[in-house]
Image (spheres, rainbow, N blue to C red):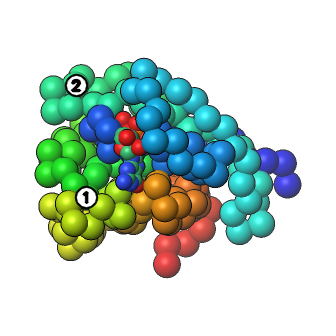
């Protein structure tokens, strides 16, 4: 089977670790002081359930509650990774606003989404509980993961799961 090309936007408030997650996934390293992103694209091939995928990741500039949803993040995007930091209440609020905007734009269709609570290594600074994240994801019928880009914890899962969600939305695999 030829590889399938899939494009995924990584969105969320600034400094939640969007770039760090992408770089950890693509390069297998954690860069501590990565310059703030304007927009970056990463590509990586991966195999999920025997199928080869060419995954293109759009690492977006951070959004806030006032950001107008950029049209280019709706056009040819197959799925979304929405990231907040478990150390930031604000980032958890912003991710919910971004979700509303995605939904407004896409209408009623199922949108493949993985909700990610990043920075689990900073457990002393945690302000968003695992339960809060899980509840929101349940409401959205989205996948929920907590990760640490720093410790390479569950990072690859994000991208495998988003591929599976995309395939599910396309009707290619039945939901679990
Ligand atoms: P972005 O603006 O969302 O792309 O965030 P960055 O990837 O630039 O990360 C912002 C800051 O958080 C940087 O100093 C990163 O080193 C740090 N960071 C990102 N992910 C983690 C993580 O999982 N754990 C910890 N402790 N720091 C992280």
- Image quarter of residue 43: top right
Q: Is 144 in front, or is 109?
A: 144
Q: Residue at x 36, y 64 (%)?
A: 121
The N terminus, quarter of image:
bottom right
Q: Earlier in the sequence, mark 1 or mark 2?
A: 2
Q: Gap in Å between the C-alphas at discs 1 and 2?
A: 21 Å
The residue closer to the viewer here, 163 or 159, is 159
Q: Residue at x 22, y 25 (%)?
A: 67
Q: Would you say 4 lies left or right of 153 here?
A: right
* Of the two numbered discs 1 and 2 in the rendering, the one whose residue sits closer to the viewer: 1
Circle 2 sits on which residue? 67
> Is 68 or 133 nearer to us in this picture?
133
User: Is residue 104 something one can see in this rendering?
Assistant: no
Looking at the picture, does residue 13 appear above or below residue 83?
Answer: above
In this rendering, would 125 be left or right of 147?
A: left
- Residue 86: image tag: 1
Q: Secondary structure at mark 2?
A: loop
Instruction: Determine if residue 88 is in view.
Output: yes
Q: Residue at x 57, y 60 (%)?
A: 156
User: Residue at horizontal 16%, vertical 33%?
Assistant: 65
Answer few, some or many: residues within 10 Å of disc 2's Cα (few below 14, many 20 plus, some between 14 and 19). Answer: few
Q: Ligand 1 is located in which of the four quadrants?
A: top left
Other residues around mark 1 within 10 Å, as few (<14) / some (14–19) / many (≥20): many
As drawn, the label of residue 44 is none
25 is higher (above) or lower (below) than 43: below
């Amino acid at each position: 089977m030829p590889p399938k090309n899939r494009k995924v936007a990584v969105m969320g408030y600034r400094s939640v670790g969007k770039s760090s997650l992408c770089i950890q996934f693509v390069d297998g390293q954690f860069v501590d002081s990565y310059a703030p992103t304007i927009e970056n694209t990463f590509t990586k091939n991966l195999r999920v359930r025997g199928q080869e995928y060419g995954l293109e990741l759009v690492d977006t500039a951070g959004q806030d509650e006032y950001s107008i949803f950029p049209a280019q993040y709706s056009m040819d995007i197959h799925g979304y990774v929405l990231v907040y930091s478990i150390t930031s209440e604000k980032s958890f609020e912003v991710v919910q606003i971004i979700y509303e905007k995605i939904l407004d734009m896409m209408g009623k269709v199922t949108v493949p989404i993985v909700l990610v609570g990043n920075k689990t290594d900073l457990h002393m600074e945690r302000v968003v509980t695992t339960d809060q994240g899980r509840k929101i994801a349940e409401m959205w019928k989205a996948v929920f993961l907590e990760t640490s880009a720093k410790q390479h914890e569950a990072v690859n899962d994000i991208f495998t799961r988003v591929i599976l969600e995309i395939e599910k939305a396309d009707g290619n695999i039945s939901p679990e």
